[in-house]
Amino acid sequence: MLAPLLQLTALILLIQSPASVTPKTADKVAPACTVSGRVVTAADGTPLKSSRVALIAEHETPDSHVYAISSDADGRFTIKDVPAGRYHFYATHIGYVDQEYQSHGSETGAILALRPGQEIKDVLFRMTLAAVVTGRVTDEDGDPMGPIQIVALRRPSEDELEDREMLSSHRPELRPVAMAQTDDRGQYRIFGLEPGEYYIEAKDEFQPQGIMFGHAWEIRRSLGSDYAPAYYPGVTQLSQAEAVTVTAGDEAQADFIMRRVKTVQISGRVIGADGKPPRDVFLYLRATPSTDFGMIEGDAPDAQGEFKIRGVVPGSYVLHAQQQISEEATYQASQKIDVGNDNIDSITLALGHGVSFVGKVEVSGGGTVNFDSLSVSMFSHEDETFGAWAHVKKDGTFQLLDMPDGNFVLGVDGLEPGWFVKAVRSGATDVLRKGLDVEKGDGGGTLHVTVSKEVAQLEGLVQQADKPLAGARVRLKPEPNTPYNQLLGQTTSTDQTSHFSFVGIAPGQYRVIAKIAGVNGAGTAASEPQLVNLSEHERKSIALSIPEPQAK
């Protein structure tokens, strides 16, 4: 469930102007739509030239097109030849915060719904200047630290926490929103930030991303780090960190020091499934609970299967080894490690000693699936670690090898929109209800995965005080909501006429609720939850009412 904002910049850089569609038969094609308006600054209404404005289909398909254009010297734009439909509508400009259509200071904007031949005029995007955090990172002697990874974190919104709950039981205290690296002077610059409070973290990690640093990357990976992650103003505990507050157009300074700590070495060996030292093994450490940025990559085991990971600071980790044995399957092994002040030199990771499953994906109710575009994974909802991954073959079969002990949720990636996982069974176990319990000593088994396109659709409207409410956030959750069915949940927003639409819903019972954030953080109002039962191919409409905010 990737948010379209995260993909917008990459998508629109590839588009110079909206593409027109040439109909094969003119009288069978619905009239196209036109959307026009202006992009100006929020501060004084100055036109913003070269702003990028884009329409992205609300319910994307492989054939979906992004309709985008740049504003002229007067900030004006016109997007032509847009098919009727429902779209996310955004404006972006370097140095400004991305803005959604009709956001009006709330957390999310409205969907733009277009009828055949409709012309929407006078759309106005008022862009707020983005904030910047700059600073310098040094060691205890005042020498510059670089390249160091710098991460800006902020507390997740209520919506973001609910989105995260759909995927995991892990509720992050802070969410990474931007990243930079220090240069040879130890200086960094994080830009494009919305006004608000941020915590700044420095880690002795960096990713070359195609930029050559000589042998720095190899040396850094081999030696590890002598520095613990630090938070502004130079503390190692998040509870002691100070937030950096920025306003629109603000440039805040956050300098701090990274200090050396006692680090340890973790060493051991990896044993292949055949009892011999394995080849082509990827080895890494990941802190627990898992975070969105950063891991410690270890050197590959040597010819005897032995490995060393240096420069590990105290903390809790999962050590993971993975070996790609074919295009479709991998061997893997994991071990939880608590690192203190002493070296750890007795780790043994045995590949191929976990529990393995074979499986097959089948279609129910008609339709065709390109099986070899699919992959199947098992992951723990408790700590977000993967149990196994497999590519599905053309005949629909797959192998999940080397799964560790635990209870796992199944996910299928690569299904086209409108398809869902209807059933997963392992013997008499309904995996979609109870998950897959794995325990060493078991003989594994067979997984029967059924996918279907016999979906339902739910639409409706949201009102407040009997008036249409654009930009309300509508969330659909399975009822009951369990770790095993959370991926069935969906979230959308109402359009400019207060309507919302969910498509491709797996049949079942759901709880639907609508929320609207108050202007300038004035609080959130929500509708009463409504229970809805949906059958295959069923289309239902409902109405939700959000109460007016109570006067203080």
Image (cartoon, rainbow, N blue to C red):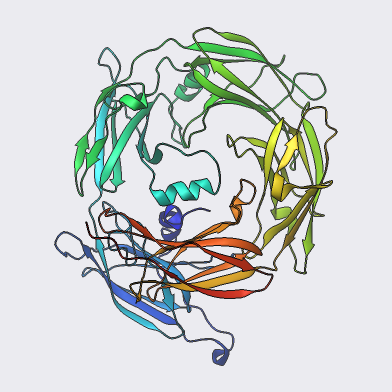
**Is 192 drawn above or below residue 335 in the view shown?**
below
State which quadrant residue 78 falls in: bottom left
- The image shows residue 464 at horizontal and vertical percentages of 35, 70
Measuring from the top left, give residue 38's x and y in whole percent: 26, 71
Residue at the top extreme, as displayed: 342
How many numbered callouts? 0
Residue at 25%, 16% (x, y): give it. Answer: 142
Instruction: Specify whether 190 is left or right of 251.
Output: right
**Which of 271/242 is in front?**
242
Q: Residue at x 80, y 35 (%)?
A: 356
Q: Is residue 362 above or below residue 495?
A: above
Image location of residue 420, percent across then percent down: 67, 60
- Residue 112 seen in this snapshot: yes
* The C terminus - image quarter: bottom left
Camera-nearest residue between 244 and 499: 499
Among the 4 quarters of the image, the one containing residue 442: top right
Residue ranking furthest to the left: 44
x then y, percent, for residue 190: 30, 39
Res. 147 in view: no
**Does 532 sit left or right of 281 as displayed?**
left
Residue furthest bottom in the image: 27
Quarter-of-image position of residue 346: top right
Instruction: From this view, report whether residue 87 is shown above or below residue 80.
Output: above
At horizontal 61% and vertical 48% (from top left) the residue drawn is 482
Vertical arrangement, residue 426 with respect to residue 150, above or below = below
Q: Nearer the viewer, residue 392 or 552?
A: 552
